Image (cartoon, rainbow, N blue to C red):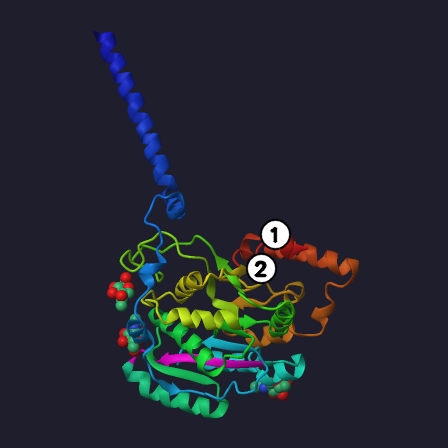
Amino acid sequence: MVGMIRRVHKWHFLHLLSTCLVLSGIMVCWDKLSVIPYHYLGLGPSFKINSWTISREEACKFSDHHYLINHKDKCESDNVLLLLFVKSSPQNFARRQGVRLTWGNESYIESELGVSVKVLFVLGVHSQPESRRLIQSQLYQEDQKYHDLIQQSFIDSFHNLTTKLLLQFNWAHTHCSLAQFLMSTDDDMFIHMPNLVHYLQQVNQVGARDFWVGRVFINSGPVRYKSNKYYVSPQLYPWVTYPAYTGGAAYVVSRDVASRIHQASLTLNASIHIDDVFMGICALVIGVTPEAHDFFSGERKSPYHPCIYKQMITSHGHETDLQELWKKATSPEVQNVDSGFTGKLYCSLTKLRLLCSPFNLNTYPCKPSTIF
Ligand SMILES: *[C@@H]1O[C@H](CO)[C@@H](O)[C@H](O)[C@H]1NC(C)=O
Ligand SMILES: *[C@@H]1O[C@H](CO)[C@@H](O)[C@H](O)[C@H]1NC(C)=O
Ligand SMILES: *[C@@H]1O[C@H](CO)[C@@H](O)[C@H](O)[C@H]1NC(C)=O
């Protein structure tokens, strides 16, 4: 009898132990499980594109804002290679000035690179009603001087970025439909304009259709922590993964894609405020998938080095060092830094050291194609 009780206890104990192990295993892996694309495994509700379709009248309401500042004829010349939208906020005067003095200088691009690029800053109105009047009058002055702002009447905020996206594609469709490429970027980005232009010219030679390039996110999903900036409620987005998209900080699409995205947006529910995710939804509708480019940076600043400047396209998080970086990254020495056997070896070793260092995660990937 006593022996039997002992056996039962032992059995119970083992049972308890194994249950605990399984449970703790699940808890440890929970974070990782939540990124599994359940809809591929048939485990969750499947993503239905139809549920985003709404009538034209309803979709119209998402972009029903009037222009306060516009330049309808900015794009009149017929040979525009790139229409470049810089998402900016009304109060970011200094950042816009930094862009004008460096990579956003249209005359520099025209004279040095021999192509036409049109740069426009895209804005809503300042979010604080108390400061709005003053800032607005400063914006009018700024625009008098540089003629490069477009502004609509919606409130400029993180949660209105999809509205800003609709503005860009709508403007491109209405006023610049012949530009070969459309790019959208932020006012704290560094763009290596010579590298970008050469790259786009190469793409153009093989005929750019269905082209969408940037930093690609696949199988990322909505953040469900309410305190997070990127929080999206299950009501707004019930699925666990987003369609593939490029980071909103910098991406380029070809003319045909820009036009079809615009068409798609005319019957889509734009209530999801994360603009790059909305772009992913539009692209899914038109059947275009994004292509990754290693030298479109992640969220961090690119390492400062001539071997990197030789290949970089974009770099994130530049507010005060644009002019210094622009000068260094476009200086003539950079062109020869990796020439010859020793130059190649030197740059490969340097990139190995810089890109594979844990301090430079989320800049450009550490992999053979970026190193060699
Ligand atoms: C833009 O570039 C041109 C040509 O290189 C130069 O003359 C001009 O000063 C630059 N403008 C600004 C605002 O830096
Ligand atoms: C977005 O803009 C609209 C129009 O100005 C405004 O009513 C709304 O409050 C804004 N949303 C956010 C989250 O700022
Ligand atoms: C758009 O989607 C949101 C969130 O799912 C929903 O609340 C809203 O009713 C939808 N709008 C239309 C016009 O269907």
Residue at mark 1: 367
Quadrant in the picture for residue 23: top left
Q: Is residue 188 magenta?
A: no
Q: Residue at x 52, y 69 (%)?
A: 253
User: In the displayed structure, does residue 155 sit left or right of residue 305?
Assistant: left
The residue under label 2 is 294
Q: Is residue 318 visible?
A: no
Residue 76 drawn at (x, y percent): 53, 87
Q: Is residue 143 visible?
A: yes
**Number of other residues with Cα within 10 Å of mark 2, as a class: few under 14, some 14 to 19, many 20 or more:** many
Q: Which mark is residue 45?
A: none
SS at badge 1: loop
- Percent from the top left, x then y, of residue 142? 45, 89
| The one of 142 and 64 positioned closer to us in this rendering | 64
Q: Determine if the C-beta at disc 2 is less than 8 A from ligand 1.
A: no
Left or right position of 70 against 303: left
Q: Amino acid at mark 2?
A: Asp
- Residues packed near mark 1 inside 10 Å, few (<14), some (14 to 19) or many (20 plus): few
Identity of the amino acid at label 1?
Answer: Lys
Q: Quadrant of ligand 2?
A: bottom left
Q: Which residues are magenta?
A: 117-128
